[in-house]
Image: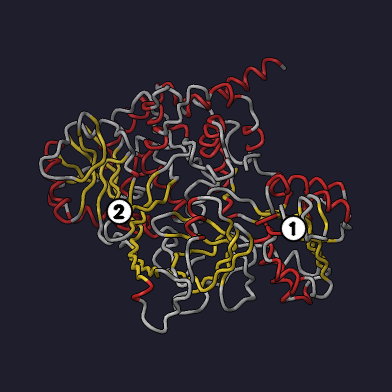
């Protein structure tokens, strides 16, 4: 265990940024979001405020180029003799230039235990066969420095999913950090974390492992008092498709949903994407961008199918997180970060869904 | 899964080496790799993403059989933005192709040694043609083959020449053709596929393989059940919107399955277990 004075963090950040890209929460237009560290960027309050988005962009960017296509169009009268030009007015020749994979290390500082768990969820999708090489390269080169949640917020409920916000050393992060008084405690967990620590050792003082005990105890007691941490996941998980899919609760609760997709964009685990072409002056750029199962054209086909109503799309999102994903990957794809609770313009969220089913069960029980 | 080393989402270039106008709105495209060989090896029922760069990309079943060692074929109906662009292409033009994707009909396992009953409607023949030709090229591995194929009109029967000249002449193969409405010059059967199915009345000593418009599948399934077929002996393919083809982008998700990766081939008892959203 190491420590550094919080007032010296800027020195630490610029030291890290000297050797590799550093991504961390930055205050911009009154909001906290992950961004690339630059000298003079506003890092006031970044240790305690929850970012609007989770930082999944560092591994699965909101927009990324997959490859470029160059088109060479030859009019028929310019085709060389001997080339088969029957019925051919023009001839289109293509070349494909794949986008380079990430090949440089980078550090992402300030992810919380829930955010790190979110990356673990993404791993299930992107690192199973066939592996997504764009994602894999970022995972291999990314060094995650996680931060314990000094001030858990009212919307937080990560403990419901077995995540410990007080001790990120239990997560898949490479380094765990804690705010202890005027200092930041720093504990490398993985080899990558050790290597990073070695590079900045001159700025760190050593500390005793017990230095973070009081902070861990304090965070744990705050979590205990938060309103959403008592949620029960009973009745959810593997094999619950029939029971939950056919429930009439969906119809009762979905109506406020505008289908705006905000919940999917702030979610650390949502990974649905679109693939599109953008025509540039030199050719065609094939890119991937985040998409949302909340949108009416997400699954729309020429024949009009499927999930044509908002209640079906609403159900899909929560069934996917709480039943289908556990069926396929043996883990929930919600991490209880509370961002959808904070950001839904209609105050509709996964906590309300879980509670609605809980109440339905209670009522059903009372009627027996 | 994919021949491209960089990533599964990066396609290969395919050259259109032949185009056949099958019906007024269906063309069959023959596709080769730039070096003249096949783009990849596939199994019957598998699909590939075909793209006109700058327009769109779509999942199409590979209609040629893996036993064809020269090229791959896609029979494509003109019905949207991408397919219209594909129909405007000419021999020598290039598209991008990635795949093959998805599972396949169990031609080497469950189908082996069995009698097979193929039931197709319209462009639904495209995925089944791959299986039929595979079985005909390995004739000794399969029993009796019955093919019931129907379309709106005689002009809309895809691959009619091959049906008449190859399938109808193959040993122990019965082909039943039908069209929806009477038509001059057609002296074959007239009527919808599900109705004709009941009229013929197949015995249940076979495996049923059904592909066509959803409404046809629905009534064919009813018909087969009435004839005593069980869910476990009927196969079909599902089709949903797809972008990635590798079970990640989320579009074709039904329950815990992804049609692009776990499908497109499903047995009806497997479909019964899925939430009713397809």
Residue A142: numbered disc:
2
Where residue B104 appears, x then y in whole percent?
64, 62
User: Callout 2: 10 Å neighbours few (<14), some, many (20+)?
Assistant: many
User: Callout 1: 10 Å neighbours few (<14), some, many (20+)?
Assistant: many
Whether B39 is drawn above or below A252: the answer is below
Q: Nearer the viewer, residue A15 or B155?
A: B155
Residue depicted at x 45% and y 62% = B8
Where residue A99 appears, x then y in whole percent?
32, 61
The answer to whether one can see residue B108 in this image is no
Residue B209: numbered disc:
1
Task: Check the residue under mark 1 and report the chain it is in.
Answer: B
Q: Nearer the viewer, residue B190 or A64?
A: B190
Q: Nearer the viewer, residue B237 or B122?
A: B122
Q: Are marks 1 and 2 in contact (CB under 8 Å)?
A: no
Looking at the image, the residue that sits furthest to the top is A367
Q: Is residue A112 left or right of residue B202?
A: left
Q: Nearer the viewer, residue A286 or A238?
A: A286
Q: Is residue B35 left or right of residue B210?
A: left
Q: Say which element carries label 2.
A: strand
Q: Hey, which quadrant is residue B205 in on the image?
A: bottom right
């Amino acid at each position: 265990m190491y420590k550094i004075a919080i007032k010296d963090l800027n020195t630490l950040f610029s030291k890290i940024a000297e050797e590799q890209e550093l991504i961390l929460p930055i205050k911009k237009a009154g909001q906290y979001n992950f961004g690339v560290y630059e000298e003079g960027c506003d890092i006031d309050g970044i240790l305690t405020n929850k970012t609007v988005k989770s930082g999944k962009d560092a591994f699965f960017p909101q927009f990324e180029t997959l490859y470029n296509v160059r088109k060479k169009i030859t009019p028929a009268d310019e085709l060389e003799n001997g080339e088969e030009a029957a019925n051919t007015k023009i001839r289109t020749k293509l070349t494909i230039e794949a986008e380079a994979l990430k090949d440089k290390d980078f550090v992402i500082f300030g992810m919380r235990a829930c955010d790190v768990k979110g990356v673990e969820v993404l791993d299930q999708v992107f690192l199973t066969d066939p592996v997504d090489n764009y994602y894999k390269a970022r995972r291999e080169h990314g060094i995650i420095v996680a931060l314990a949640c000094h001030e858990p917020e009212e919307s937080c409920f990560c403990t419901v999913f077995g995540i410990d916000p007080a001790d990120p050393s239990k997560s898949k992060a490479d380094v765990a950090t804690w705010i202890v008084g005027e200092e930041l405690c720093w504990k490398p967990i993985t080899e990558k974390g050790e290597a990073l620590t070695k590079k900045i050792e001159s700025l760190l003082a050593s500390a005793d492992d017990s230095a973070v005990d009081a902070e861990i105890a304090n965070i744990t007691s705050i979590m205990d008092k938060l309103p959403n941490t008592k949620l029960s996941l009973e009745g959810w998980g593997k094999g619950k498709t029939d029971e939950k899919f056919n429930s009439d609760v969906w119809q009762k609760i979905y109506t406020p949903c505008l289908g705006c997709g905000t919940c999917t964009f702030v979610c650390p685990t949502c990974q649905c994407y679109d693939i599109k072409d953008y025509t540039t002056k030199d050719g065609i750029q094939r890119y991937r961008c985040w998409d949302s199962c909340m949108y009416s054209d997400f699954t729309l086909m020429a024949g009009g199918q499927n999930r044509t109503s908002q209640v079906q799309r609403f159900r899909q999102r929560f069934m996917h997180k709480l039943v289908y994903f556990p069926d396929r990957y043996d883990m929930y794809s919600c991490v209880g970060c509370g961002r959808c609770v904070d950001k839904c313009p209609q105050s509709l969220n996964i906590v309300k869904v879980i509670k609605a089913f809980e109440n339905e069960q209670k009522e059903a029980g009372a009627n027996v | 899964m994919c021949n491209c080393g960089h990533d599964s989402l990066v396609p290969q270039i395919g050259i259109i080496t032949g185009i056949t106008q099958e019906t007024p709105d269906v063309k069959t495209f023959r596709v080769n790799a730039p070096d003249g060989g096949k783009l990849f090896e596939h199994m019957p029922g598998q699909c590939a993403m075909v793209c006109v760069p700058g327009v769109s990309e779509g999942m199409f079943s590979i209609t040629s059989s893996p036993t064809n060692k020269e090229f791959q074929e896609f029979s494509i109906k003109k019905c949207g933005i991408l397919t219209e662009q594909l129909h405007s292409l000419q021999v020598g033009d290039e598209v991008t192709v990635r795949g093959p994707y998805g599972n396949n009909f169990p031609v080497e396992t469950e189908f082996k040694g069995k009698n097979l009953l193929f039931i197709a409607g319209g462009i639904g023949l495209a995925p089944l043609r791959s299986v039929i030709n595979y079985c005909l090229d390995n004739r000794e591995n399969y029993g009796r083959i019955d093919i019931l194929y129907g379309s709106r009109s005689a002009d809309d029967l895809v691959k009619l020449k091959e049906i008449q000249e190859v399938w109808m002449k193959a040993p122990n193969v019965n082909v039943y053709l039908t069209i929806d409405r009477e038509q001059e010059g057609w002296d074959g059967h007239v009527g919808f596929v599900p109705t004709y199915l009941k009229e013929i009345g197949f015995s249940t000593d076979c495996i049923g393989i059904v592909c066509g418009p959803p409404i046809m599948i629905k009534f064919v399934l009813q018909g087969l059940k009435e004839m005593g077929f069980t869910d476990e002996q009927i196969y079909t393919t599902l089709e949903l919107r797809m972008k990635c083809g590798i079970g990640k982008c989320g579009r074709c998700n039904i329950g815990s399955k992804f049609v692009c990766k776990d499908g497109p081939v499903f047995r009806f008892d497997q479909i019964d277990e899925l939430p009713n959203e397809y």
